[in-house]
Amino acid sequence: MHSTEREAQIEALAEVREAATRGELTAAHELALAAKRWVEQPGVMQRVLNDLERETGFRPGASAAPEVWRRYGGLSARAGNLADAQVALDLALALEPDVYRTRIDAGTVAFMRAELPTAQLHFERAAALKPAEPEPLASLAAVAARQQRHGDARELAERALALRPGLVTAHMAIARADLLEGLAARAEARMSELLASSALNEAQRIGALDLRADALDALDRPADAFANYTSRNAILERINAPRVAAELRERSIDQARRLARWFESAPPEPWRTKPGADKVRVVREHVFLMGFPRSGTTLLEKTLACHPDISTLEEVDHLSAAAGGLLASDAALRQLANLNPTQADAIREAYWRGVETSVGTSLSGRILVDKLPLHTIAMPLIARIFPDAKILFGLRDPRDVVLSCFRRRFQVNAAMFELLTLEGAARYYAAVMSLARQYRSLLPLEVHEVRHEAMVADFEGEARKTLAFVGAEWNPAVHGFAERARARAVTPSDLQLTRGLNTDGLGQWRRYEASLAPAMEIIEPWITHYGYAQA
């Protein structure tokens, strides 16, 4: 499916989802029927049916549209394509909202996408449809454990195990609760028993390896923990490699290297001029927060989001949606370099429409912080389209960054796929940081660096400097970042911040130094460049 088709499909199904969320089931059903044009579009339904028949032997009848989409959603999820899976399952539910299996599948996909409130709603609906079934209870236990409600997690999981003693999801929820309560040895033993079973599917094996690795880390057995992270990532890489290869014209690391080569010989003059001011924006200040994943950008975003004058946009890539094609080739980069005010205004309008939809409230007179760590790659877009925007650049010891990227489990997209091997994570970090240094020597952008270690050591001092840079007065409300993280703990960084400010993540690389050896030569120049050689 072409990107424009997929965008239109997702937009149509978003309307279905929104109507269903409001409780307007009749309207949702009508919208879903309208969205069935995607089922009937030449090639789309045939692709679905071909995939289903090849993978499952399923041959639907003419009236089986909801079941087709449910099965296709499950197939997409198993292939690692969670966005397509969610779209398919949303359509199935809009057509038939009270199907137990579809609710379970939709909840599972939402859980895998870290959309925990949505997952909880699906599992609760499934439990209401079949009160005697243990699976919804175990799934609700998993949600509670991820939300760090360990008491609820344990109670729900034990209820599920009373109904079905071998239920894997319930055992995992209890293991996560054990970890939260400091009972790492119990968690490790439970996961080791699970992993000894040949009955686990790949998703279950990934989850069990992830939990056992975290338990081993808590038991101060870093070599064993690293081996488990490696095994987990190897499965994730194998599952996702076909999808990444099929969907991408260019790997993320190859994009960074191509851009570096192009800008080496690019004439500087066009990049130091402005194609007109951004007259579309209504915000007081426009700020992009970037760096590299696991470099402290989430702490910064949550801190700034607590300020009454600041709105934040967290990892929704409206910049690429509006203008990402301008980085796609040498010809596109030349077009970007020669962008005129009319062309720039059209992109600005598209960007701000998307931002306003995501934020959901008026931005007039406010400060917008658009946070996406890998906006680093898109700095030329910012320089040409939003030349008056400011840049917050998060930094952290490269050894901790690469280790954390390898250890933490992300939703696997094109960029995160690069982090599934240690050397791959190190090479991608080096490529992005090299590109950032190149950009900063060329582009007339106002940049303020924030070191994660400094933020942890002197939170208020660093917060004051950051607020001054973005144009905001000091406000003690920024101390509420942990509560904000708890309200919507989605990413690995969110989950860590729920515990408040702590030094646990600083210098973790020392415990894993032997395992990190293959990456050290790759990142050594950046350790020195950013002044961490003596750390």
Image: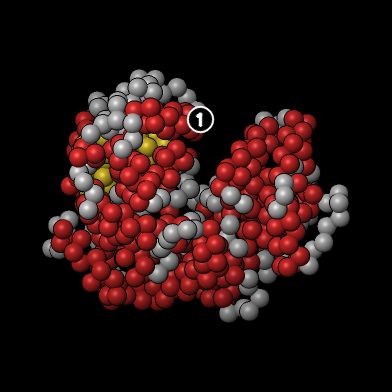
Is 477 left or right of 244, judged from the image as shown? left
> Is residue 448 visible from the viewing direction of this image?
no
- Residue in front for this viewpoint, 404 or 138: 404
* Residue 500 x/y as whole percent: 35, 46
**Residue in the picture at 33% in, 35% down:** 339
Is 251 left or right of 238, judged from the image as shown? left
* Quadrant hosting residue 517: bottom left
* Amino acid at circle 1: Thr
- Residue in front for this viewpoint, 514 or 28: 28
* Residue 264 x/y as whole percent: 22, 54
**Number of numbered discs overlaid on the protein picture:** 1
* Quadrant hosting residue 523: bottom left
Question: Up-down: is 303 above or below 474?
Answer: below
* Residue 126 x/y as whole percent: 73, 49
Q: Which residue is mark 1?
A: 357
- Residue in front for this viewpoint, 488 or 416: 416
**Residue in the picture at 31% in, 65% down:** 426
Which quadrant holds the C terminus? bottom left
Q: Residues within 10 Å of mark 1 (few under 14, many from 20)?
A: few
Is 155 left or right of 437, judged from the image as shown? right
Identify the colour scheme used.
secondary structure
* Residue 22 x/y as whole percent: 67, 30
Question: Up-down: is 348 above or below 199?
Answer: above
> Is residue 258 visible from the viewing direction of this image?
yes
* Quadrant hosting residue 460: top left
**Residue in the picture at 64% in, 42% down:** 9
Under circle 1, the secondary element is: helix
**Residue in the picture at 79% in, 63% down:** 58
